[in-house]
Image (spheres, helix red, strand yellow):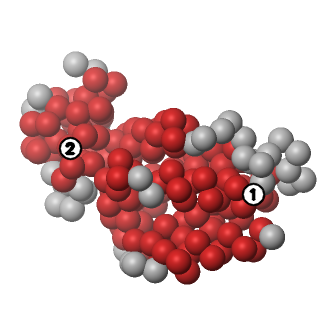
């Protein structure tokens, strides 16, 4: 067994059961190993959680690539709307449960979550920039704007106010 073979099984466990009360034993059981072997492979629980969160972020971006109807959007607004439409599909729901737990950990100031969330957001920011139109006048700034609207709109959707978040796309008109 290696880190690369353990992560998919643990990721599936987290997507099914969430991060609340996460401990090594259930993760080890899901991966078909022992908690000692997890520490051997990852060094510490914090390092394991960081690797697991990075792995889940990679899965999320792969799913976005598969769901995104085009390589690059026609506009910032089209990028926003395509991501919102794609991530509204049921297969994305487990990722949002995991993500909001990470965000809550960040709000509590938990260092492992802050570090991982920063890496996840950097990865998503790069993904958005790569999917903006090739002629976007400022892709870095555009990606920051689009990602900010996506995150806000998804949070509003999670609390039952999706129409408010979707209306944010009008800023691009």
What's the mark number on residue 107?
none
**Label 1 Cα crowd, 10 Å radius (few <14 / some 14-19 / many 20+):** many
Judge from the rendering whether residue 36 lies leftward or rightward of residue 90; answer left or right.
left
Residue occupying the point 63% across, 68% down: 149
| 110 and 27: which is toward the camera | 27
Q: Is residue 9 above or below residue 16?
A: above
Q: Position of residue 15 (x, y in %)?
A: 27, 48
| 77 and 62: which is toward the camera | 77
Locate the C terminus by quadrant.
bottom right
Residue occupied by mark 1: 76
Q: Is residue 152 visible?
A: no
Q: Is residue 56 above or below residue 22?
A: above
Q: Quadrant of residue 80?
A: bottom right
Q: Is residue 142 above or below residue 14?
A: below
Residue occupying the point 57% across, 53% down: 83
Residue occupied by mark 2: 13
Q: Position of residue 112 (x, y in %)?
A: 39, 56
Task: Determine whether the residue tagged by mark 1 lies in a helix, strand or loop.
Answer: helix
Badge 1 or badge 2: first in the primary sequence: 2
Task: Determine whether the residue tagged by mark 2 lies in a helix, strand or loop.
Answer: helix
Q: Is residue 118 above or below residue 24?
A: below
Spatial CA span between label 1 and label 2: 35 Å
Residue occupying the point 45% across, 58% down: 88
**Label 2 Cα crowd, 10 Å radius (few <14 / some 14-19 / many 20+):** some
């Amino acid at each position: 067994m290696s880190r690369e073979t353990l992560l998919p099984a643990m990721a599936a466990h987290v997507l099914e059961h969430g991060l609340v009360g996460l401990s090594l034993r259930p993760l080890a059981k899901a991966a078909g190993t022992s908690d000692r072997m997890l520490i051997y492979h990852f060094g510490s629980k914090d390092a394991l959680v960081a690797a697991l969160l990075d792995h889940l972020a990679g899965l999320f971006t792969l799913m976005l690539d598969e769901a995104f109807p085009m390589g690059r959007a026609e506009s910032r607004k089209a990028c926003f709307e395509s991501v919102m439409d794609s991530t509204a599909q049921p297969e994305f729901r487990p990722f949002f449960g995991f993500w909001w737990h990470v965000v809550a950990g960040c709000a509590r100031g938990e260092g492992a979550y802050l570090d991982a969330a920063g890496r996840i957001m950097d990865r998503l920011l790069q993904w958005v920039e790569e999917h903006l139109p090739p002629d976007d006048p400022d892709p870095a700034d555009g990606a920051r704007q689009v990602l900010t609207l996506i995150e806000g709109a998804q949070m509003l959707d999670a609390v039952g106010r999706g129409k408010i978040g979707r209306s944010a796309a009008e800023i691009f008109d």
